[in-house]
Image: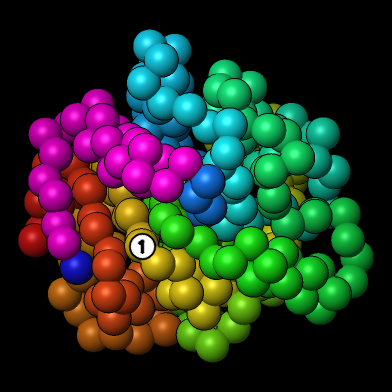
C-alpha cells in the first residue's frame, strides 16, 4: 500500500482529487467506483472546481457506487443516490444514465447483489475505487467479521454504524437498518483503490488496516493484499503510523 501524507482535510481532498483526475484524464471512458460519507465530500468539491475551470471532462465517465441503504427509494434525501447527485453529479457533465448504485428498493437481496455485480462485470470492472474507512475498520458497509469472498450483498448495519450515520437523519430511528454493499471481493477486483481518511477518530482503524493482521475483524486490512492501493490521509488519521 502506498501512503500519502496530507496536512489536513483540504490537502487530503486535493491530493485524492488529483489521483481521480489523473484517472479521468488518462482514460476518459473510465469506470469510477465512488463512495459516500463525510470524508469524500471535499474530494468531490475539488473535482467540481476543476471541472468548472475546464480541466476535467466527465462526459464519458461511468460510475458505480459502493453501497446504498436498503428500504429507501433513491429520491429519499438521505439515499446515497441523492448524496451523489448533490455532491458531484449535479455539478459536472456526467451522463445520468452512466451512474449506477444498488437499488435500495429491491426486496430480493440475492437478486439485487447479482444484478449489481453483473453490471460491474458488464462494464469491464472498476478502474479506480474510492473508499472511506469506518472507525471500526469497515469499508463500504462490510462490517467486522464479514466474509472476504462476498460480492454485492445485503448487510444488517451495526449499532455503531447507525450511531455514526444518524447525524445525516432527523432522528436515529430514521436510519435504515440494512444496506446493499459491494463485498470485499467486488472491491478487491477494482484495478486501483484509493482510500481516504481524515481525523483522529480514524487513526486506530488506519493503523489496524495498514499494519495489523489481515483479518475479517478489520475489513480494511484486506487492502494490504491489493496490488495497487493508495491511502491518502491527513495528519490526524495517520498519527499512529
Ligand atoms: P465517513 O465514513 O467518511 O463519513 O467518516 C466513512 C465510512 O464509514 O466508510
Q: Does residue 82 sit above or below 116 in this rendering?
A: above
Q: Position of residue 17 (x, y in %)?
A: 32, 35
Q: Residue furthest right?
A: 107
Quick one: SS at disc 1? strand
State the residue at coordinates (29%, 81%). Answer: 225
In terms of secondary structure, what is the magenta stretch mainly? Answer: helix
Q: Does residue 203 appear left or right of residue 116 in this picture? A: left
State the residue at coordinates (14%, 50%). Answer: 4
Q: Residue furthest top?
A: 53
Q: Does residue 3 appear left or right of residue 150 in this picture? A: left
For residue 20, say whether it is visible.
Answer: no
Q: Quadrant of the N terminus?
A: bottom left
Mark 1, residues whose alpha carbon is within 10 Å: few (<14), some, or many (≥20)? many
Q: Position of residue 138 (x, y in %)?
A: 44, 65
Q: Does residue 125 appear left or right of residue 225 in this picture? A: right
State the residue at coordinates (14%, 39%). Answer: 6
State the residue at coordinates (47%, 41%). Answer: 28
Q: Mark 1 = which residue?
A: 192
Q: Position of residue 148 (x, y in %)?
A: 49, 85
Q: Which residues are magenta?
A: 2-28
| Residue 134 found in image quarter | bottom left
Amino acid at each position: 500500500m502506498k501512503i500519502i501524507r496530507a496536512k489536513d482535510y483540504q490537502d487530503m481532498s486535493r491530493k485524492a482529487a488529483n489521483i481521480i483526475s489523473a484517472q479521468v484524464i488518462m482514460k476518459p471512458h473510465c469506470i469510477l467506483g465512488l463512495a459516500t460519507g463525510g470524508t469524500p465530500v471535499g474530494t468531490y468539491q475539488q473535482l467540481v472546481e476543476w471541472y468548472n475551470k475546464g480541466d476535467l471532462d466527465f462526459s464519458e465517465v461511468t460510475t458505480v457506487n459502493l453501497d446504498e441503504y436498503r428500504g429507501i427509494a433513491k429520491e429519499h434525501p438521505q439515499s446515497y443516490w441523492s448524496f451523489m447527485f448533490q455532491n458531484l453529479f449535479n455539478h459536472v457533465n456526467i451522463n445520468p444514465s452512466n451512474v449506477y448504485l444498488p437499488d435500495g428498493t429491491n426486496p430480493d437481496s440475492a437478486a439485487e447483489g447479482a444484478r449489481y455485480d453483473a453490471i460491474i462485470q458488464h462494464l469491464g470492472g472498476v478502474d479506480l475505487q474510492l473508499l472511506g474507512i469506518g472507525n471500526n475498520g469497515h469499508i463500504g458497509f462490510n462490517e467486522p467479521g464479514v466474509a472476504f469472498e462476498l460480492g454485492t450483498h445485503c448487510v444488517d448495519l451495526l449499532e455503531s454504524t447507525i450511531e455514526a450515520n444518524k447525524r445525516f437523519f432527523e432522528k436515529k430511528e430514521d436510519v435504515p437498518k440494512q444496506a446493499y454493499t459491494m463485498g470485499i471481493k467486488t472491491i478487491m477486483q477494482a484495478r486501483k483503490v484509493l482510500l481516504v481518511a481524515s481525523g483522529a477518530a480514524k487513526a486506530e482503524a488506519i493503523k489496524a488496516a495498514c499494519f495489523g493482521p489481515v483479518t475479517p475483524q478489520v475489513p480494511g486490512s484486506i487492502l494490504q493484499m491489493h496490488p495497487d492501493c493508495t491511502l491518502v490521509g491527513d495528519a490526524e488519521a495517520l498519527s499512529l503510523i
